[in-house]
Image (cartoon, coloured by chain):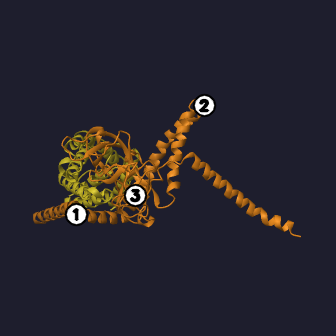
């Protein structure tokens, strides 16, 4: 029960960081705290619940970007559910694997989001996917490992 | 046990499918419905998060302002050598501050929050909503000129569509009111994407580079007289039936953090963006001095009359 409340606390903190630290940095290569939050939750819940968490988080993010409303929810629910299904294959306390897990999650999110949103032209989309998204994924991966380390979150999957 | 696992997996798949379908439905909803749902979420759940973002952007602004302050201090130190530059800057700041005074009423000042998210680079969140009198299609301006238009309004906030959006249009004219056309974003590549196009100009009309372009007020969405940009060059394609001009915008939305939302009653703003002439300033100062003198006389006359009364 203690770890449950700790998990909720970390989730809320990460959502808050997304809207406080991220605008503060204001760079194009940014840490996606929402992706980290959803991935951390996905490790500890069933795929269906992970999809619901991703969907709700995505709707919150989408409410600030009404022209692409639904794209964030789609990307986060798909990513959360996939992460929950794949968790058994990825885990342990290996920091490198954890970083790859978070980075891959961010990359998957960006791909689904950008394609669903249909705002960018082909050229801009390729630049975003092959330049900015991998760099943001790298930053997100490192930040994810830092969050796991600081809050001593277990990355062992639960049945 | 195996059946329970299979059943659980099936439930997971159903929930995932429901989430995906709901997301796809949200993506294809009509714009008004999307605005409405997004607005409801923004006004309830996301309110505290927006407040957080406002604080964060103010903090970032403070970091940037610190550098600006340092630069101004340097300017003061070099004042004697750079007096001319300072005078020019003074004029510019007076122009910025003067806009609000010239408009007097019919506008709401607000902060424009740019979001560093992947999508939606063509909108900003404006921290004034229906409670402040903002309505849909209100023009959003900076002291330099037009930025966009309001497309969604909530009680405390609204969403503004920037001129960079491919579907943004505004009826425009040359500053002298001689040539009319429609302004839209120039959908070019590289640096060209930060320019505008004046389309649909009649072939008999021509515009010289540097001609100022303003909103014409036709269509009643944007008030007449808001500066939009200056003509760069003629980019009319051979065989076209109307002229098209490349226009350099007077303001880049990404640089703007404070905006004014013009309320619907505002009709003609040509005078708001004209610099006050020196004689009009002298007249204004004279009027202020006269009124002060009248007020002083009003205060002193009763005492005097009492003393003079026999």
Dot 2: element: loop
Residue A124's quadrant in the figure?
top left
Work out whether residue B204 or residue A62 is closer to the camera in this orientation and state it: B204
Q: Mark 2 lies on which chain?
A: B
Residue A3's quadrant in the figure?
bottom left
Residue B239 in picture, x, y percent from top left: 18, 43
Mark 2 touching mark 1, by CB under 8 A? no
- Disc 2 and disc 3 on one polypeptide chain: yes
The image's mark for residue B80 is: 2
Work out whether residue A96 or residue B224 is closer to the camera in this orientation and state it: B224
Give whichever of discs 2 and 3 has the lower sequence position.
2
Instruction: Tell me if mark 2 has few (under 14), some (14-19) or many (20+) residues whose alpha carbon lies within 10 angstroms of its own.
Output: few
**What residue sits 29% from the left and 65% below the top?**
B37
Instruction: Tell me if mark 3 has few (under 14), some (14-19) or many (20+) residues whose alpha carbon lies within 10 angstroms of its own.
Output: many
Indicate the chain coloured yellow by its letter.
A
Give whichever of discs 1 and 3 has the lower sequence position.
1
Q: Which chain carries label 3?
A: B
Q: Mark 1 points at which residue?
A: B29
Q: Which chain carries label 1?
A: B
Q: State the separation of the CA atoms marked 2 and 1.
A: 62 Å
Would residue B73 be visible to someone looking at this image? Answer: yes
Q: Mark 3 points at which residue?
A: B223
Residue B101 in picture, x, y percent from top left: 53, 55
Nearer mark to the viewer, of 1 and 3: 3
Residue that lies at the very extreme toward the front in this rendered image: B204
Residue B174 in picture, x, y percent from top left: 37, 48
Residue B54 in picture, x, y percent from top left: 43, 54
- Disc 1 and disc 3 on one polypeptide chain: yes
Indicate the chain coloured orange by its letter.
B
């Amino acid at each position: 029960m203690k770890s449950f409340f700790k998990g909720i606390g970390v989730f809320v903190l990460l959502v808050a960081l997304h809207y406080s630290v991220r605008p503060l940095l204001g760079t194009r290569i940014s840490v996606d705290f929402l992706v980290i939050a959803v991935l951390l939750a996905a490790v500890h819940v069933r795929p269906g619940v992970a999809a619901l968490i991703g969907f709700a988080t995505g709707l919150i993010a989408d409410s600030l970007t009404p022209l692409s409303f639904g794209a964030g929810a789609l990307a986060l629910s798909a990513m959360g559910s996939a992460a929950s299904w794949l968790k058994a294959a990825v885990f342990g306390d290996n920091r490198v694997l954890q970083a790859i897990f978070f980075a891959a999650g961010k990359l998957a999110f960006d791909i689904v989001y950008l394609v669903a949103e249909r705002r960018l032209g082909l050229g801009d989309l390729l630049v975003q996917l092959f330049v900015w998204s991998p760099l943001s994924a790298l930053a997100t991966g490192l930040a994810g490992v830092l969050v796991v380390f600081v809050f001593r979150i277990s990355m062992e999957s639960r049945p | 046990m195996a059946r329970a696992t299979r059943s659980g997996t099936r439930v997971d798949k159903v929930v995932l499918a429901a989430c995906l379908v709901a997301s796809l439905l949200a993506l294809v909803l009509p714009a008004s419905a999307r605005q409405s749902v997004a607005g409801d979420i923004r006004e309830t759940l996301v309110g505290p998060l927006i407040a957080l973002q406002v604080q964060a952007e103010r903090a970032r602004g403070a970091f940037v302002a610190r550098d600006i302050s340092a630069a101004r201090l340097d300017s003061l130190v070099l004042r004697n050598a750079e007096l001319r530059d300072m005078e020019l800057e003074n004029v510019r700041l007076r122009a910025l501050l003067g806009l609000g005074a010239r408009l007097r009423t019919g506008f709401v000042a607000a902060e424009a929050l740019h979001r560093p998210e992947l999508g939606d680079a063509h909108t900003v969140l404006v921290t004034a909503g229906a409670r402040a009198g903002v309505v849909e299609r209100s023009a959003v301006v900076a002291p330099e000129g037009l930025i966009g238009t309001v497309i969604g309004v909530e009680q405390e906030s609204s969403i503004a569509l920037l001129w960079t959006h491919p579907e943004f249009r505004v009826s425009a004219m040359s500053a002298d009111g001689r040539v009319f056309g429609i302004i839209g974003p120039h959908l070019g590549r590289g640096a060209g994407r930060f320019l505008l196009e004046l389309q649909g100009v009649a072939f008999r009309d021509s515009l010289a580079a540097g001609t100022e372009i303003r909103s014409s007020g036709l269509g009643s969405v944007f008030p007449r007289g808001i500066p939009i940009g200056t003509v760069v060059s003629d980019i009319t394609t051979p065989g076209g039936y109307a002229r098209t001009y490349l226009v350099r915008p007077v303001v880049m939305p990404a640089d703007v953090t404070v905006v004014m939302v013009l309320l619907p009653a505002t009709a003609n703003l040509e005078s708001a963006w004209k610099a006050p002439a020196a004689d009009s300033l002298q007249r204004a100062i004279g009027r202020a001095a006269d009124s002060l003198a009248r007020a002083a006389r009003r205060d002193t006359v009763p005492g005097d009359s009492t003393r003079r009364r026999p």
